[in-house]
Amino acid sequence: MPYTPPPELASLSIAEIAEMAAAQKLPPVDQWDPQETGDSEMRIAADGTWYHQGDPIKRPAMVRAFSSILRREPDDSYALVTPYQKLSIIVEDAPFVAVELESEGSGAKRTLAFRLNTDHLVVADADHPLRFGTDKPQPYLQVRKGLEAVLARPVYYQLAELALDEAADPLGIWSAGTFFPMAADS
């Protein structure tokens, strides 16, 4: 079955987005312990561009495929993992970029949904929290175990505008019943 990217988030309800996000099936990379290891000669730049041997990977389907087998290792390095092989990959910042945001509701009833540069969908909630870095005021979204998405600047501005409009004290944003303060992590 050919890959069909999700429609623009604005055309979907949050319930439809959450359903699509839940339906995204990923390989069980955390269960695999391959004995063969090596270097993938790949890198994910801070802007979310994937490179192999210094050249950008131009096929979105390849990036999506590789992103589905990406895992964070206990030593905080990253690897591409199959049942038979584990290859290291360099990640300059976060492996994903949140490129689109859809918001529904307000205050404690708000739900935020994000589309990543890989077209994966993530709803911010207790299992997928937003966090704000200590070294720069850059927000991150937990995508799955140990893997985060940095919010693209326009998405960050949209998020900040929503938070400022709500004027919560402390400044922050609600999503799916969880409050995320916008103060830097401690």
Image (cartoon, rainbow, N blue to C red):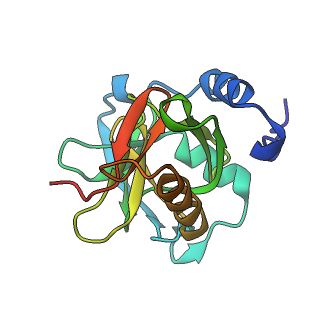
Outermost residue toward the bottom?
A: 54
**37 w.r.t. 45: above or below:** above
- In this view of the protein, which residue sits in the foreground, 37 or 137? 137
- In this view of the protein, which residue sits in the foreground, 41 or 157? 157
Left or right, 163 with reference to 18: left
Q: Position of residue 118 (x, y in %)?
A: 63, 50
Left or right, 145 with reference to 165: left
**158 w.r.t. 168: above or below:** below
Q: Position of residue 82 (x, y in %)?
A: 46, 35
Outermost residue toward the left?
A: 186
**109 w.r.t. 77: above or below:** above
- In this view of the protein, which residue sits in the foreground, 167 or 122? 167
- Residue at left offset 35%, top offset 53%: 171
Q: Position of residue 28 (x, y in %)?
A: 45, 24
- Residue at left offset 78%, top offset 45%: 10
Quadrant of the rendering where the C terminus is positioned: bottom left
**172 w.r.t. 85: above or below:** below
Query: How many circles with numbers are drawn on the protein?
Result: 0
Left or right, 134 with reference to 86: left
- Residue at left offset 47%, top offset 71%: 45
Quadrant of the rendering where the N terminus is positioned: top right
- In this view of the protein, which residue sits in the foreground, 96 or 53? 96
Name the quadrant containing residue 57.
Answer: bottom right
- Residue at left offset 76%, top offset 31%: 13
